[in-house]
Amino acid sequence: MAADSTLLRAPAIDWPTIAGCLGLDALGLFGLPALHLHGLRGYAWWALCFGASFGLLARARQGDRRALGLGWQIEPSAAFWLRVSAWMIGAIALGFAAAVVPSRSGSDPFGFCRPAGEVGIQRISDDVLLAPALEELAFRFLLCGALAGRLSPGANIALSGAVFALAHVVLGGIGPDSLLGGFFLAWAFLRSGTIVVPVAMHAIGNALLLALTGSGALALLACPS
């Protein structure tokens, strides 16, 4: 991605501050399973770590909402991002099409044939609202945001996408969506200049995936009859 197409224009911040932001970000993500925190204690842990990381970043950016990616204006336009979302969904759908081949042979590397579980209000809330907000906060707002101006946009996108995929490998839930989606979402954050866009795209993608898994359509396509 060319530098002049990046709307998140932020000056480089010093490496110690970046290290502090990313260290707290990683602690929030990977400390949760290590400490066996669940429920309210898990949310409190996230709030503590991500909040402290945000505080460091906001101080380094001198509270500049534009440099932090906290603007509400959608650039270049909402229609542009709807088209981008369609391209992202199409690319990930191709990834799923390739991934069902080994599943139909019985290996099921992505767990498509595991019981999908009941789709209720709690799961919808977690998958479509909470997960996109928390993951975009961790992987785009804090990671990409701290490195904006320090790394080139391309390197920033590559790093965010790779860490997003690695985190899903470590924490579970790996699939074609998490292998590919992080790169699209990092580009969307840097290109739009606002965290609103990747959160919305992430929520749309998760809603579609939940519909596929909850309805049994994905298992029907991927699992041997």
Image (cartoon, rainbow, N blue to C red):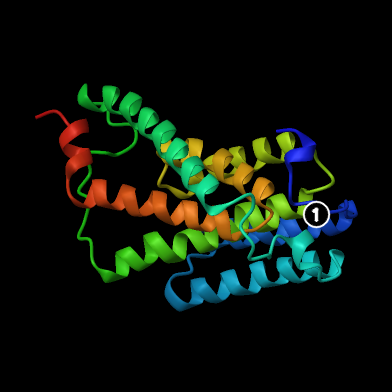
User: What is the quadrant of residue 26 in the picture?
Assistant: bottom right
Could you tell me which residue is drawn at 86 percent across and 69 percent down?
Answer: 62
Of residues 40 and 99, which is closer to you in this image?
99
Could you tell me which residue is drawn at 60 percent across and 73 percent down?
Answer: 47
Q: Residue furthest left?
A: 225
> At label 1, which amino acid type do we have?
Ala
Of residues 71 and 180, which is closer to you in this image?
71
User: What is the quadrant of residue 154 in the picture?
Assistant: top right
Q: What x and y, as percent, mark residue 61? A: 84, 64
Q: What x and y, as percent, mark residue 80? A: 54, 45
Per the image, the residue denoted by label 1 is 19
Using the rendered image of the protein, determine whether residue 169 is visible from the camera's viewpoint.
no
Q: What x and y, as percent, mark residue 188? A: 60, 46
- From the viewer's perspective, is 64 left or right of 83? right
- From the viewer's perspective, is 175 left or right of 143? left
Q: Looking at the rendering, in which quadrant would you find the N terminus? A: top right
Tag 1 secondary structure? helix
